[in-house]
Amino acid sequence: MITFLLIIYAIALLGVTTFGLLGFITLWFYWKHRHAEEAPPALPFGMDMPWVTVQLPIYNERYVVNQLIDSAVQINYPAERLQIQVVDDSSDETTQQAAERVSHYQAQGVNIQLLHRGNRQGYKAGALAEATAVAHGEFIAIFDADFMPPSDFLRHTIPYFVAQPRLGVVQTRWGHHNAESSPLTAAQAIAMDKHFMLDQQVRHRARFFPKFNGTAGIWRSVCIQDAGGWQADTVCEDLCLSTRAVLRGWDFQFLPQLVTPGELPTSMMAYKNQQARWAKGAVQCLQKFGWQIARDKHQRPLGRLYAILSMAGYFAHPCLLAILLLQLPLLWLNYPLPPELTLLSLAGLGQPILFILAQQLIYPDWRRRLRHFPTLMLITVGLAPAITRAIGQVWLQREHPFARTPKGQAEAADQPQQPRTLDGYRLPFDWIVLVEIGLAVYAAVTLAVAVWQGYWGALFLLSFASAGMAYVAFLSLRE
């Protein structure tokens, strides 16, 4: 019995350690390529600007649809070469709002169309596939409903395509216009800044399977076609298409200096919903492409390994849960864990170092922003049940509906005349909250037993696990 428990514990700890080591690998390659920043290319004098289509996929986004369309119309680009598609799957008054806004700009001569579907077949991937089939653009920029493209977006991105014929995608860095609205959004901003400022830069500069993040980027349309188009067999259509494009030999460009502001989820339920979908989609893509990536001789072995480990990164959450659940039986059986196993946990420092470094690279006041770092750590631990469930659903469920993240929640709060409890924008109660409460209590009991037995090696993990589960459950119940 003891041997079996220790084997499971060692496997789980190895999983968490591997994810931590991925952080150190990222840190090393960022340092190695830190001076590899390319100078922005210039367009040839007198060149005719290429056709560009801007796609705005929306689904029940009444609080943000107007600002989205307004931002897209204000993009600085020759009007005779720009097409805007509002790709609408909405089932509420969003469609009417979008139609009125589109008509308003059409009357001013703007080339903008509303493409409304009567069904959600294929979800976002299906909507983009249908819109792309009738798009005029040689290049296709995509902005989700909660993003506001800067007016100079195309002026900064198109020159890269002209200079590099095999460039398939340009991805910009996400900004966060509501990062300071709450500890939750501030913690999310730290996590997203790390992903874009470090993970994405390493993927691009080291050629480690770079990816498109679903929004705030622009594709070469022939790249989309060559890679097989938008496919709806995963819930992360962006990672799916990106991986196929890399496997087809297309190049990617990441622009950390060009920031496209967006909105972070303002509720814990919405954030859990988003993270669970990303976890499920990453695992689906790992299933779909893992073997192809491993055999791709055009990529370096380390690049292939990095891509596979990145897709598998969400497995750190079930591994963390296993470690937590095994603590109490091992303590109860009075079997102290080998110190060598505990020392492996030091590899987990790789990710926190990246979080801190990203803040230092972006913000002059980075020390002030790091006051929300403990909140991020609590949330990361507290998300483990929801993400573990999402991973399990990859194999246990036949259908995987696209779970949207409610947007414009801050705007909705300013409109009390709109009953948000009835309009479908507020997420329903999720039974996973009960699991979080149970695990918070379980971790607290395990902590008490560890103190009673004088086992201090697990105090940090148990304290953070109990506090993290309780914090996530509290925010979920409060909503």
Image: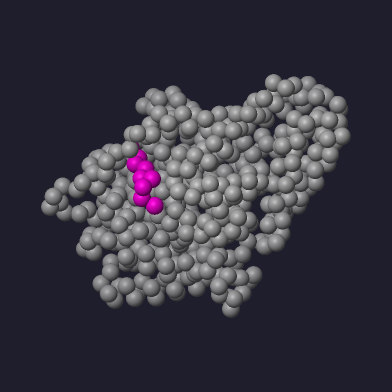
As for residue 49 lying within the magenta part, the answer is: no
Residue at horizontal 61%, vertical 64%?
426
Residue 178: percent from the left, percent from the top? Answer: 51, 59
Residue at horizontal 70%, vertical 61%?
478
On the rendered image, what quadrant is the N terminus found in?
A: top right
As drawn, 363 above or below 413: above
Q: Which residues are magenta?
A: 251-259
Residue 270: percent from the left, percent from the top? Answer: 59, 57
Give the side of residue 230 with respect to residue 398, left or right: left
Looking at the image, can residue 158 be seen?
A: yes
Looking at the image, can residue 277 be seen?
A: no
Q: Main secondary structure of the magenta part?
A: strand
Residue 22: percent from the left, percent from the top? Answer: 53, 31
Q: Nearer the viewer, residue 332 or 398?
A: 332
Q: Nearer the viewer, residue 439 or 371?
A: 371
As drawn, 57 above or below 369: below
Give the side of residue 285 with respect to residue 76, left or right: right
Residue at horizontal 57%, vertical 38%?
352
Give the side of residue 250 with respect to residue 213, left or right: left
Quarter residue 226 falls in: top left
On the rendered image, what quadrant is the C terminus found in?
A: bottom right
Q: Nearer the viewer, residue 215 or 452?
A: 452
Looking at this view, name the residue that lies furthest to the bottom: 417
Residue 466: percent from the left, percent from the top? Answer: 75, 44
